[in-house]
Image: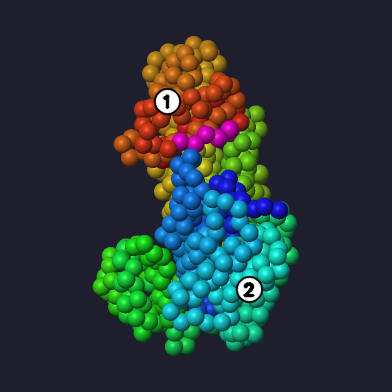
Amino acid sequence: MVLRIDAAAFTAWTELCVASLSSTRAEIDAMNVFPVPDSDTGTNAYLTFVSGAEAVADAPADLELPALVRHYLDGLLTGARGNSGVILSQLVRGCFAGLPLDGEVDAAHVAEAFERATDASYVAVGDPKEGTILSVARAASEGARRAAEEGRDARDAFTIAAAAARKGLRRTPEQMEVLARAGVVDAGGRALVVVLDATEQALTGRMPDPVSATVPVPVAAGDDLVEGGPGYEVMYLLDADDDRIAELRRALAPLGDSLVVVGGDGLWNVHVHVDDVGAAIEAGIAAGHPRRITVTHFADQVARQRRSAGRRVVVVATTGPGITALCEQAGAVAVPFTRDEPLGGDLVRRTILGTDADEVIVLPNNQRYVGLFEAAAKEARQSGVRVAVIPTAAQVQGLAALAVHDAGIDFDDDVVAMSSAAGHTAHGAVTVATEPGMTMVGPCVAGDVLGVVSGDFAVVGGGQLEVAAAVLERLLSPASELVTVVTGHGAEEDLGPALVRHLARSRPDVDAEVHEGGQENYPLFLAVE
């Protein structure tokens, strides 16, 4: 069967990789013992591929495949996290460099792409070791080459490469003593297997055989985590001419270990473990212009992870089946309510305690429910559960907060990020008056369309689009970047798309997205971030 890669299939693959790494990142984090047992390999791999997928989502809709792949590879490179994330970005970069993006792909192309990727990753690592993600990559490339020599097609080559990678992963404890002692396979190699399995699934529709997770023996962490090992991870993006990179590698190599430098065409991602942070950064300054510099003290990182090692859940009060589905798709526990069936204290309390989580973040999404959730949170804290209630007053504030939720970071950092996202989201709505009354902007009669800005009536008009546009104008500011439109019951036909078209004419610099929320009483919710 002929294999051609198109933009839609490529985009679906990027999303499947993210979903697969999301579901396995806790498992991968738990088996992370090399090069340092900092329990973040799964999270780093996940965040790296999220960065790539976001770059694709933000790309213009009419991009041809080669340009779309370039967006993705740039996203992977600039968003790569940790040792394994950087290597994974190089593997993907090398692989796509060997695949024809404008024609048929055969098994020979797949084999060449895998070999190119593996060779590039070995070159990128300062001190390559077997029993790591590199060994798993080599096993995959050997499987792809075998498929090509047997005359198999491209899909079979990907399938055989993924199977060979799984076998290579099982061999890693035989190649590295620290893995054998801990009773685990290599965490970075496991992340690569997840990506290859997702690739096989995307191409064939078949679910690969699962790789059983092994439980690690706890590894004691001292000040530097491993005896004699460096205490800090230094990462930065580097704008530098390609001919300066060899000199950079020579300067960084004596400073520590786990050196990985990937990239090309003037943009590089540098990763190294050192004790002398200043020297690592100075080496980058000598080679070019380092930016987005991050320094992690491993001992502090492990201490934070031990404090927040429990399961974390987000509980969200939702109105409308569409909004409920959006929140559940994001992994949250939704507590639906309607005007006829409001939330009660017993349901809220049972929901929080019923999550069986050690950490809970609550998004009430309605001012009258904040106190209800606070009372339930106080009771849950007495049972040892860590609970934070972010006082969101609107559904769209909750969606903004949920969009930045990251269970892989410290609990307090997660709460701060979600609170900031909610707080910086201006919100409004459109509803229809059911009886005569007086608003802050004058009288209304039954059937008038009312515009709500930050909880107060601010517009009275005759048409939903007219009022929605007026509300949107009040919410927008020069710094606005994204408008979210959520349609509900009673929305006029084409209301969401028509409002987006209006926005495109008045503020072409602002992006927009439309969701069908299905909420009652409000034909439209609006958010501006």
Mark 1 lies on residue? 502
- The amino acid type of the residue labelled 1 equals His
Q: Residue at x 59, y 75 (%)?
A: 138
Tell me the number on the disc at residue 142.
Answer: 2
* Closer to the camera in the image, 216 or 208: 208
* Closer to the camera in the image, 29 or 432: 29
The image shows residue 232, relative to residue 458, as above or below, that is below
Callout 1 environment at 10 Å: few (<14), some (14 to 19), or many (20+)?
A: some
**Residue range highlighted in magenta:** 512-517
Q: Residue 142: image x %, image y %?
A: 63, 73
Q: Quadrant of residue 255?
A: bottom left
- Earlier-in-chain disc, 2 versus 1: 2
The image shows residue 493, relative to residue 369, as above or below, that is above
Q: Residue at x 44, y 15 (%)?
A: 461
The image shows residue 161, relative to residue 512, as above or below, that is below
Quadrant including the C terminus: top left
Verify whether residue 91 appears in magenta: no
Under circle 1, the secondary element is helix
What is the image's colouring?
Answer: rainbow
* Closer to the camera in the image, 11 or 387: 11
